[in-house]
Image (cartoon, rainbow, N blue to C red):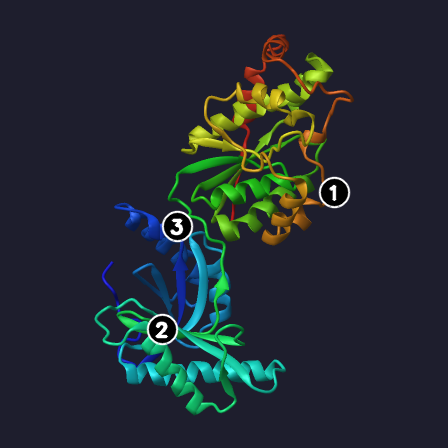
Amino acid sequence: MNYVSVIKDAPEARIILVRIGEIALKGLNRSTFEKNLYRNLREKLKDVGAPDIHWSQSRFYIVPVSLPFDYAKAMETASRVFGVVSTSPALACRSDFEEIKKAAVKVAGEKLEALKSGGLTGPVRFKVETRRGAKSFTMTSPEISCELGGVLLDTYPELVVDVNEPDFILYCEVREESFLYTDIYKAKGGMPIGSNGKACLLLSGGIDSPVAGYMVAKRGVKICAVHFFSYPYTSERAKEKVLELAKIMSAYCGEIKVMVVPYTEVQLAIHENCRDELGTVIMRRSMMRIAESLARKNGCAALVTGESIGQVASQTMQAMYCTDAAANMPVFRPLIAMDKVDVIAIAREIGTFETSTLPYEDCCTVFTPKHPKTRPSLEEVVAEEARYDFEKLEKEAIEGTEVFTCG
């Protein structure tokens, strides 16, 4: 994309600098990923003053179109957009060294004042780091850093140079225009939503499945979700809990379509007609068939679950093999080798943990066998399943599905 000035007619401008990660390593299709990220940023920032967004040389620039502008909220919002690895509030100026010096004095002065307000006393240690992207600029990066350091020492007597343990770093990027800043805020990284297809998440309402959806979405996959609802054995509050989880996830994953499947009749038929110890695996196979049907109708190329090896009886390798055999599309399990404590840590980080632990049970806890078989064979599961024709009930469940949009 051709560079668009972020300062326009003014000598300087307050902007938000956005850094990308893996996207910068892409080859000829890199622009496709950049355009996806641009659309996602624009969509997320529409409620934060609808700023202009430009990009050039592995940097995106969020430029306010009017004041006042909530920079903190904009940075927080941008940090949740997958594909963004970090953000910085920056002062942009022309790539003229006299203008760069003025901007450096201003940015360093503001940081110095913030440190003092935070209780820092005595000499303030600093260093300057320069990145010269515009090779036509006559000064080298070390020369720029040295000159700017001298200017700051002359301007602020309380400053001392310390390249090993500075209290702050003044960063200077010299590109088509120059950008000066002192703070870098980590973002989520990953790939832009929509750049790697679409998948359907089996969203149970527990801790694991929202994290699984988040992790797949972080790789650029657009997700929809299917939830199996067994009223009256599970309450309306259980359904509301799942919709709230989808809403929380949408802050990262974008708008999520949630399909709520009325599963009571199918579940009762399994409970009444199949051996108790195989009921859970047969139920999971039924869910896979229904989820796959809904996934295909919504243009999805895969299913996603929150399963982890050995966590419960239905998540042994043998049980998951039997489950997968019921599906004719890939089943992704991003949590497959993760410990529960690590999953919980991510759930807390993304804000789903508190809702996931509300005491409203999902259908997987209904009619749970006392002694489920942990090593079923596919042959015995298929034979047991054949004792009853589930196809009609599954079709009716699909036809009765409710659809909600969250986010």
Tell whether label 2 touches label 3 (CB within 8 Å).
no
Q: In this view, does 185 lie above or below 313?
A: below
Q: Which of the 4 quarters of the picture holds residue 52? A: bottom left
Q: Where is residue 159 in the image (x, y as percent from the top left)?
A: 50, 86
Would you name the residue on which mark 3 appears?
22
Q: Dot 3 lies on which element?
A: helix
Question: Could you tell me which secondary element the residue under label 2 belongs to?
Answer: strand
Question: Where residue 29 appears, x then y in whole percent?
Answer: 28, 45
Residue sitting at x 43%, y 91%: 155
Nearer the observer: mark 3 or 1; the answer is 3
Above/below status of 329 relative to 75: above
Q: Where is residue 157 in the image (x, y as percent from the top left)?
A: 49, 91
Crowd around label 1: few <14 · some 14–19 · many ≥20 (10 Å): few
User: Label 3 sits on what residue type?
Assistant: Glu
Residue 254: numbered disc: none
**Does residue 407 appear anywhere in the picture?**
no
Where the N terminus falls, by quadrant? Answer: bottom left
Label 3 neighbour load within 10 Å: few <14, some 14-19, many 20+: some
Residue drawn where x is 46% and y is 53% of the image? 189
Q: Quadrant of residue 288?
A: top right
Q: Mark 1 points at which residue?
A: 359
Q: Name the residue under label 2.
A: 179
Q: Which of 114 and 268 is in front in this view?
A: 114
- Amino acid bearing label 2: Phe
Residue 91 visible in this rendered orientation of the protein = yes
Residue 90 percent coordinates (x, y): 41, 73
The front one of 337 and 269 is 337
Instruction: Of the two numbered discs 2 and 1 on the same chain, state the one appearing first in sequence.
Output: 2
How many residues crowd mark 2 within 10 Å: few (<14), some (14–19), many (20+)? many
Mark nearest the camera among 2 and 1 is: 2
